[in-house]
Image (cartoon, helix red, strand yellow):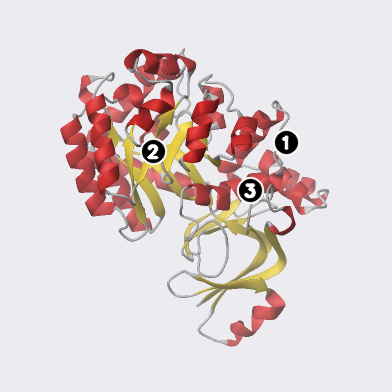
Amino acid sequence: MRAFRGTFIHFLDNPETNPDSSHQLIEDGLMLLNDEGVIIDVGEFRDLKKYLMDPCVDYIDYSEYIIIPGFVDSHIHYPQLEMIASYSGGQLLEWLERCVFATEAKYKDYEYAKLKADIFFKALLKNGTTSALVFTTVHKESTEAFFDKADELNMLMIGGKVLMDRNAPAYLLDTPEKAYEETDCLINKWHNKNRLRYAITPRFAPTSSEAQLQAVSALKKKHESVYLQTHLSENKNEVKWVQDIFPWSRDYTDVYEKYELLGKRSIFAHCAHLNDREFDIIKESNSSIAWCPCSNFFLGSGLFNINKAREFGIRLSLGSDVGGGNHIFMLQVMDEAYKVGAVQNYNMSPLASFYQTTLGNARALSIDDKVGNLVKGKDGDFLVINPHATPFLEDRLKAAETIENKLFCLQMLADKRIIKATYIKGNKSYESNSLIKESFF
């Protein structure tokens, strides 16, 4: 058994719907994990310190630090990490053509993909992300490399091979038949293997023929417990393109609706230009939206209508969308989300922000039975936060008297230097090697 001492902050429910009992703050707490890395108990140190009498207990003292659940990222492309912050001179469609496709072509080679997967997961752990919903590339090899590394690290990851058979370079196209066969094979090999989950992954409607969308529908019906992830209504030119390609459709979402791709385990990234009918069908189907504020800014896609999403009661999550998003650190994604809300007269509270990137995202991805908070029976995926990482941050936090203000300071001012350690099922997977305080800022 392992015992971790520190200040614990985690969420039990959404602060916006259950403000009185949404979170738990334990100033001097102890968390107990069994040998499998599953949480046995979390509580006051004074109440649980009796377990430390057992000489077999491995005691780790983080008394000067804050322990929170690991971050969950609901939309990210692992092959695009190597071309993050690429200048295209255009918006989404130009960026895909000029920057993304050539990069993704490299991932047909398993050894190359494996090398980049290793870099990707190191970046996630260093930035405190312990679970994510991930796009690979059209190549089976890139998907194998992704899952091989995730399994090696024992991380709870969801991912899938990208499907596209038109409107992209020939070297990246598959066929409806190949898409079905390779995805079916990958699902059978990886879905629910250890902590892994599979997501059927058509890139977006313009790059899939109706025959391929029919194959996606067939896969979804055959494998009812798998996920589906794609993009929806990210850019106005993209929306117009969909209308041209699918002239029979009422709107963009109608394309996915026709092929029965909506549902509880369907996650649609962006959704920046939905009409009321689309919001309504997403709500009624219990689908969820991955809000990606960083990439919406970076690619000039527009502002997600957070008030409309709240009005319709949409299941919402936050995604970094690397490489369209230029930040992999989820606190910086929270920072951008706050600003998007602020210009729409929605001031997202720091409690709501931290809830969203932990338990809220886990709920949106239907993995909250395993991760998202630090309660008995959950997997021990958590972060050790260093509030003294820089003299500036330490000084600012001293003036923040409430938990809300402390979290807001972290959200607005912190960077990856605050991640002292990242734990996966109770095992240390990353530790900052900084022996001295960073520079003032």
Mark 3 neighbour class, 10 Å CA radius: few under 14, some 14 to 19, many 20 or more: many
Q: Which secondary structure lies at badge 1?
A: loop
Residue 339: % across, % down: 67, 30
Mark earlier in primary sequence (2, 1): 2
Which is closer to the viewer, label 2 or label 3? Answer: 2
> Is 406 displayed left or right of 213 in the figure?
right
Type of amino acid under label 2: Gln
**Mark 3 highlights which residue?**
354
Q: Which secondary structure lies at badge 2?
A: strand
In percent of the image, x 47 and y 16: which residue is there? 91
Mark earlier in primary sequence (1, 3): 1
In percent of the image, x 34 and y 52: which residue is there? 225
Residue 361: % across, % down: 53, 47
Which is closer to the viewer, label 1 or label 3? Answer: 1
In percent of the image, x 39 and y 41: which residue is there? 134
Type of amino acid under label 3: Phe
The quarter of the rendered structure image containing the C terminus is: top right
Q: CA distance from mark 1 to mark 3?
A: 14 Å
In front: 357, or 325? 357
Type of amino acid under label 1: Asn
Q: Is 151 placed above or below 164 here?
A: below
In front: 194, or 3? 194
Q: Is residue 63 visible?
A: no
Residue 205: % across, % down: 35, 25
**Mark 1 highlights which residue?**
347
In front: 18, or 372? 18
Mark earlier in primary sequence (2, 3): 2
Q: Is 46 placed above or below 143 here?
A: below
Residue 167 lies in quadrant? top left
Q: Are marks 2 and 3 in contact (CB under 8 Å)?
A: no
> Is 338 displayed left or right of 146 in the figure?
right
**Mark 2 highlights which residue?**
229
